[in-house]
Amino acid sequence: MVREGRPPEGSWTEHYPDLGTEAISFADSTSKEFYEDEREAVFKRAWLNVARIEELPRVGSYVTKEIEAARCSVILVKGRDERIRAFYNVCRHRGNKLVWNDFPNEETSGTCRQFTCKYHGWRYGLDGTLNFVQQESEFFGLDTADYGLSPVQCDIWNGFIFINFDPEPRQSLREFLGPMITGLDGYPFDKLTERYDWVAHNNSNWKIFADAFQEYYHVPSLHTQQVPPEVRDPKAGFTCGHFQLDGPHRMVSTAGRRRWLLPDEYMYPIERATKSGLVGPWRTPDIGELPMAGLNPGGIEPWGISNFQIFPNIEILIYGGWYLLYRYWPTSHNTHRFEAYTYFSPARNVRERIEHEVAAVVLKEFALQDAGMLGGTQAALEYGIVDEFPLSDQEILVRHLHKVSVDWVEAYRREKTPTPAGV
């Protein structure tokens, strides 16, 4: 895909000729066969964000992550050298799951000096080294240096921890992210550490939910109670201010109107009472100078939100003084786990804490309105009656996500079944 912005003239979609403008298929969201190849082509080759560094605050801190699309569990741990590493969550003796509490399929976290297998007591250091084997003399020529935990590629960008299941990734993390995403360098993510999160298990392919946050064409119809008249009027021609593509990644920016200038009927009573809600706290602390060239590359005034969608499955939605993080984890061809996080500057008093909690709850309500469409969309797509769907210029990011997913899968399939010599 082209790495550039919009020209002075022409539609957004036509500026990226590789995308085309014809109707598209959503077979990539209904096919079991496609999903199986997508797991290998995308989720085992792309860099995947799994955590932030605040989740591993000290030496020995660890979290486990269940990655259903890769059919494995991963341990993230901060070592004695302060480095964060990732390992497959598998004991090298008999394959027992190494780190878990009451239920082996549930994620867990904590702090430890070493990892000890519940089954036979093998012990591993924070760097994955096998440090102890019970009754080691009973084994035949066992070299403990050969049986450390199996590593997973791990790297960090601006406090976001990424892993890659490819033992030799084709690009470094920074190369993979590219200039549009790394244009956020300098945004003070490290100052926004008060977090609220929730998880939803949805009956749709992961891309179908991602599509809902890639366009605002649906806003006048779906979110009528929370938007001003100039937006909810279907004849008003509401659209976004800027779309941009960079490699496999996408972004959209919208203009913003101050929430407190809206009539009372366009917000919940709790928003007016707490001065917080859909666009976050009305007052946010000074978090320093923001990298506006990267944050608002279209130069929209007044700027409201920029939504950066990092392929394959995460979104960072920045509102200036706080941000949202979304992750979509496929669990089958037509189900996925949706993780949502809101990040604020730590509250300095009770009022600010209430403002943050209200914003998190109102935003959850807004997202659930989008989630409410998923089951119906997935069910209708699986009827197989229609497989040509026209997309508007405002839906360029929907078109892009599905094209990139198909491109990655087709490239994988070509590698798996190379063309015979001479053909």
Image (cartoon, grey):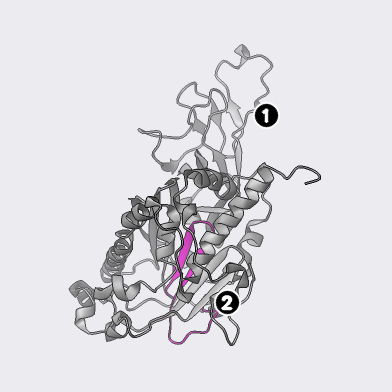
Q: Residue at x 56, y 23 (%)?
A: 93
Left or right, 63 with respect to 350, comes to right
Q: Is residue 234 above or below residue 210?
A: below
Q: Residue 73: percent from the left, percent from the top?
A: 49, 39
Placement of the N terminus among the 4 image quadrants: bottom right
Let me know if residue 248 appears in the view: yes
* Pointer 1 local density, CA inside 10 Å: few below 14, some 14–19, many at least 20: few
Left or right, 92 with respect to 220, comes to right
Left or right, 285 with respect to 15, comes to left
Q: Residue at x 59, y 36 (%)?
A: 128
Q: Residue furthest front?
A: 385
Q: Give the number of the disc on residue 14.
A: 2
Over which residues does the magenta segment extend?
Answer: 295-319
Q: Residue 28: percent from the left, percent from the top?
A: 49, 53
* Pointer 2 local density, CA inside 10 Å: few below 14, some 14–19, many at least 20: some
Residue located beneath label 1 in the image: 145
Q: Residue at x 32, y 81 (%)?
A: 231
Q: Which image quarter: residue 216? A: bottom left
Amino acid type, mark 2: Glu
Q: Residue at x 41, y 52 (%)?
A: 384
Q: Is residue 316 magenta?
A: yes
Query: Secondary structure under badge 1?
Result: helix
Q: Residue 369: percent from the left, percent from the top?
A: 29, 64
Q: Give the number of the disc on residue 260.
A: none
Instruction: Calculate the distance from the C-alpha at mark 1 to the C-alpha at mark 2.
Output: 56 Å
Amino acid type, mark 1: Ala
